Image: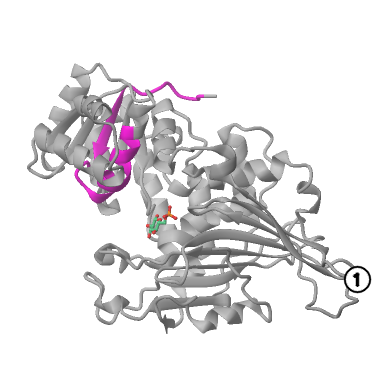
Amino acid sequence: MSTQPPSDALVLFGATGDLSKKKLMPALYSLERHGRLTVPVIGVARSTWTDKDFRAHAQESILAAEPDADHAVIESLCKRLDLVQGDYADTATWDTLKKKLDHHRAEQAVFYMAIPPDIFPEVVESLASVGLNQRGRIVVEKPFGRDLNSARELNATLHKVFPEDKIFRIDHYLGKESVEDLLVFRFSNTLLEPIWNRNYVRSVQITMSETIGVEGRGSFYDGVGAIRDVVQNHLLQVIALCAMEPPVGPESSFLQDEKAKVFAAMRSIDPSYLVRGQYVGYRDEPGADKDSTTETFASAKLEIDSWRWAGVPWYFRAGKALTAAATEVVVEFREPPSLLFDEGGGPPAGRNLVRFRLGKRDGVTFTLQAKTPGPHLDSQNVDVAVDFAAALGERQEAYERLLDDALAGLPRRFAREDIVEQTWRIVQPALDHPGPVHPYFRGSWGPAEADRILAGDTWLAIST
Ligand code: BG6
């Protein structure tokens, strides 16, 4: 299914940065361990590091993520590492990089941009200045723009030197097994698909809650906020997988086409159904402005004007410093036509739920009704749950899968240009008319105002 030749080198811009340390080095280690890394890895960075420093940094990053890592594997990974040190504005940096790739006879490199977005244009233009845009594909980290206009500008900048099929836009949620499972679960189980529509589904709730705050990322986060950080990308991608029509086949273009269709049918956020919050103490975080109105919590209602979903509310809430760490999609079904089994007069029967747990302990839970023991005909909730780690065994981390795909030339788990632009169109009114930011306490479920968007419903409990 590879639509592009496999790569013969990995060039890592921002090799000494935070993303490289926390995600990319551990992912490279894991690829090496599984025998899937076969190419040289050339770091590019502005620091004054030597090759030796770079290798020591790699080792340290891997051991921080995986204290029991195999030293022999780290060593073989380190042998692949090479550093080009220099200023991005200096033509010598690009000449050196080109010479390294010539030395490795690399013609299909992956250029991975683990760098701040404001320097993407400079880096892609410099790559083109030495002809390297003809010798590989580019992987671009989020945030992909700040709004619809800047995303369009960024796409235009990239398209000047790379064709669309050579641009791999990363959203690490697309690399999560549990997120991809939404698609498989929906379209491989006959049980679900006939009821997956407005006739049976009452509402869908998506919660992306983190217990951590901004954790030293204040200076990045303060200019971004929850809507740009997780709603425009991760959360909308999850919704698309839950709402889209079946793709014609597993090829990337079929999947992307169906996502594009569901986003096209999704209304832009109505600011009167938007609630933004900020945890108390956020303004004291290093890097945050003392008067910051950046949201660390966002909640809204989304609507999809399609034959499948018209009239079904899609509620979401996403925030930091909340009471639980969970990423869940809860699909709530309508009640049966009448409640026959209520002889004992106990609590009213709950509605059926399908709960996709996408976070750490991922899996699926069906909440069904079963007979309450005793003489009366009464029903009560029972959960039928599967824990994917227990049932399916070890699975790869998102970054490992995405790096593997980028190296293999598989575009399926990356975001296409039109989809990124649609998602910005959907959140744009929330950026243009953000309204007030409501304070909330750490360890809560966010500001109480978030209940308002449910119009009489309640947030369903999260299974922590
Ligand atoms: C990142 C955001 O993209 O996703 C972070 O920048 C957020 O702020 C993270 O914490 C959440 O990812 P995960 O995989 O931990 O759910």
x and y, in percent, of residue 211 in the image: 41, 67
The answer to whether any part of residue 180 appears in the image is no
x and y, in percent, of residue 50 in the image: 8, 35
- In the image, what residue occupies the spot 37% across and 54% down? 143
Q: Specify whether 186 is left or right of 167.
A: right
Depicted 122 relative to depicted 248: above or below: below
- In the image, what residue occupies the spot 36% across and 47% down? 141
In the image, 334 versus 159, the foreground residue is: 334
Q: In the picture, residue 131 is in which quadrant?
A: top left
The span shown in magenta is 2-29
Depicted 204 relative to depicted 395: above or below: below
In the image, 408 versus 339, the foreground residue is: 339
Quadrant holding the C terminus = bottom right
What colour scheme has been applied to the protein in the rendered image?
one colour
- In the image, what residue occupies the spot 27% across and 43% down? 67
In the image, 462 versus 224, the foreground residue is: 462
Mark 1, other Cα within 10 Å: few <14 / some 14–19 / many ≥20: few
Seen from this angle, which residue lies furthest front? 374
The number of numbered discs placed on residues in the rendered structure image is 1
What residue would you read off at disc 1?
375
Cβ of disc 1 within 8 Å of ligand 1?
Answer: no
Q: Specify whether 443 is left or right of 373.
A: left
Quadrant holding the N terminus = top right
Q: Specify whether 98 is left or right of 276.
A: left
x and y, in percent, of residue 28 in the image: 32, 34
